[in-house]
Every structure is written in structure tokens, then in C-alpha cells.
Image (cartoon, helix red, strand yellow):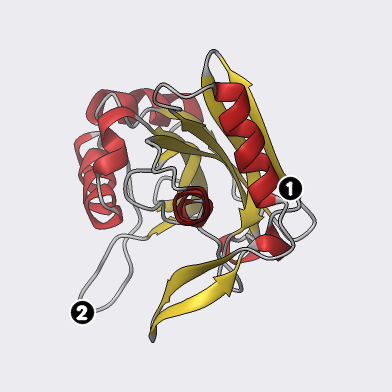
Amino acid sequence: MRPVRIWFRKVGTARYISHLDLNRCMARAIHRAKIPLWYTQGFNPRAFLTFALPLSLGVAGERESVDIKLDDEGTMTDEEIIARLNEALPDDIPVFAVTEPVMKPGKIAYASYELTLDPEGRDAEETAGRIAALLQSETLVVPKHTKSGFVDFDIRPYLDHVRVFTDNGQVRISAILPAGSTMNVNPTLMLDAVKAELGLDLYAQIRRTDLYDENLKNFA
């Protein structure tokens, strides 16, 4: 049994695939690619697939991962795994690396995001300035969905690693936010604040670019 971590992107139309469907898609691709997947023992054997941190629907991922266990004792090379999976997976879910797992997914504490906002005819520099000023407010309370319903949540303490700028006539937000089992701040909460406080309901594309541990060390 050999544990491996498969690194892939979730881009294009794959952004709108739910995590459950992604799980099914990956499992079927592994089966079609004839990857020697290890199954649990017992009465009801099942495949071992563990995704690091599921993406929200509509969010693209540049550095996603899934852990599997191989029942081949190292006879299949990492390059062969990559090639076989890319033949079996949709183009919008390309595999780009296979490594040995180093960090456990439970160590993830932060995620980095890139948000691209369309100013929709407004001056991009002015719009970026207004958004930057808002995100630097002393407090910034938005409704946050929890298991017990919506609660008022101040996102301002979690916005220390946020930068707002313009690029080719669009507004860009680069952010590192808490993510994981302890605290999770969805980047859409910043968009909710922009809409509520500034009256700007802007179309945004969101990409998650990386994951980190509590010391902001890259997830590996």
C-alpha cells in the first residue's frame, strides 16, 4: 500500500461541479485509468479518497489535491499516473503533479484567493479605492450562515492579508483568509459587505490559489 497525493486544477466549467460530483468523477477516472487503487478490507470494501479542503460551488481551484492509496508497491510511476488520469478526466480538471503526502489535511488553517470583479462601467480605480477603504473599516459585520442559521459576523479581524488593486480595467482582490476546521471565512463575505455597504453588486470570478498551515507554510 502506497499513499500518494494527486494535485489537480478545478477550472472552467468544472467550477460548477459539486464536491460530491467531483468525488464521483475522480473515482470513476481512477477506475478508467486502471490505477491500482487500494480498498478497505471487510464486508463492504470502499476506495480511499480524501480531498484536502472542498471548494465552494462556483470557485475555481488552482492547487487542489486528493489523497489515495495504491496497491502496487511502487510499480506505477508518478508520471504514468498523471498521464493516465489526464486521459480519463475532463479537460477542466487537469492533474499536474503526484507526490507523497507531507502535511495532513487537518493542518490546513488558511487559503489564498484571487477575486476578479467587473466594475460594470464604473471607474475601476475609484471602485477599487472605495472597496479598499471599506475593507479597512474598524468593523465590518455581515450575515454568516452557520449550522444554527445566520448570525452577524465581523469579518474585519480576518482581513489583514487583503490587497485591492486594478488590472486591465478590472478590480482585483488578493486575500489570505482563515480556512479549515477551526475557522473558515468564505471570500464571498467580502462581496456581501461590498454589496451591503457600498451598494455594488459586482460580478466576480473567484479562484483559490493555495492552502497553508497555521504558520502560512504551503500545504504539501
Residue corresponding to mark 1: 161
Kindly report the distance in space between the C-alpha atoms of the residues bearing marks 1 and 2: 49 Å
Rendered position, 168 above or below 74: above
Residue 52 vs residue 218: left or right?
A: left
Rendered position, 52 above or below 80: below
18 and 124: which one is in front? 124
Rendered position, 119 above or below 3: above
Identify the residue shown where x is 51% and y is 45%.
5
User: Percent x, y for residue 19?
Assistant: 30, 54
Task: Say what secondary structure mark 1 lies in.
Answer: loop
- Label of residue 217 in the image: none
Residue 55 vs residue 135: left or right?
A: left
Task: Say what secondary structure mark 2 lies in.
Answer: loop
Report the label total: 2
184 and 196: which one is in front? 196
Structural crowding at the residue carrying mark 1, measured as other residues with C-alpha within 10 Å and reported as few (<14), some (14–19) or many (≥20): few
User: Percent x, y for residue 159?
Assistant: 69, 54
Q: Which residue lies furthest to the bottom in this view?
A: 148
Kind of residue at disc 1: His
Q: Is residue 12 visible?
A: yes
Residue 105 vs residue 156: left or right?
A: left
Identify the residue shown where x is 36% and y is 31%.
11
Mark 1 or mark 2: which is in front? Answer: 1
User: Percent x, y for residue 55?
Assistant: 41, 51
Structural crowding at the residue carrying mark 2, measured as other residues with C-alpha within 10 Å and reported as few (<14), some (14–19) or many (≥20): few
167 and 201: which one is in front? 201
Q: Residue furthest right?
A: 215
User: Percent x, y for residue 117?
Assistant: 47, 32
Kind of residue at disc 2: Phe
Identify the residue shown where x is 44% and y is 50%.
195
Residue corresponding to mark 2: 43
Q: Which of marks 2 and 1 precedes in the sequence?
A: 2
